[in-house]
Amino acid sequence: MQELNLPPFEAKVTQSGEKLLIWDVLRRRHVVLTPEEWVRQHLVHYLINHRGYPKGLLSLERGHQYNQRQKRTDLLALDANGQPLLLVECKRPTVPITPTVAHQIATYNLTIGAPLLLLSNGLEHYCWRVDTVNRTNERLNEVPVYLSC
């Protein structure tokens, strides 16, 4: 898999027939290792090991409704009260981060209401603090540490 602009972690990769599988610490099972999954797994380990997000408060592919359609979030971190804190959208490394891609996560967040957004293709990362009351966004230089959110 491609080298990403994220800290390495000890990935547990196995082969099943033609498919590569990676151990997912959140789902506690092997999942198909796609380029997008490679990015997601790096971000999961980054949030847990480098930013202090509790593993038990991270949720993968959580369903939500938008425009009467069922959608799934790539990754959602909850705060200590179980409320959305950080919404993460992962793209495979070959997908450039464009305004259209940023609009996707912002649109999802209309129904989720997380105060922090993270968009990454593994090579480029963009994090924002969203103020829904004043309808403003502040670009952050890094993902906030869990306790300082």
Image (cartoon, rainbow, N blue to C red):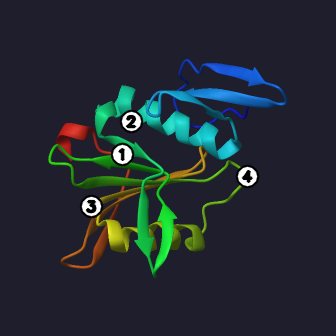
- Residue carrying label 3: 115
- Tag 3 and tag 2, C-beta contact below 8 Å: no
- Residue carrying label 2: 47
Determine the CA span between mark 1 and mark 2: 8 Å
Give the residue type at disc 2.
Answer: Leu
Give the residue type at disc 4.
Answer: Thr
Q: Give the vertical position of 112 relative to 90 (above or below).
A: below
Mark 2 vs 4, N-terminal side:
2
Mark 3 vs 4, N-terminal side:
4
Determine the CA span between mark 2 and mark 4: 22 Å
**What label does residue 94 carry, if any?**
4
- Residue carrying label 1: 143
Between residue 46 and residue 124, name the one nearer to us: 46
> Which residue: 48% across, 39% down?
43
Mark 1 vs 4, N-terminal side:
4
Horizontal and vertical percent position of residue 10: 55, 17
Give the residue type at disc 3.
Answer: Pro
> Which residue: 72% across, 35% down?
2
Mark 1 vs 2, N-terminal side:
2
Q: Is residue 100 visible?
A: yes
- Tag 1 and tag 4, C-beta contact below 8 Å: no
Mark 3 vs 1, N-terminal side:
3
Between residue 89 and residue 125, name the one nearer to us: 89
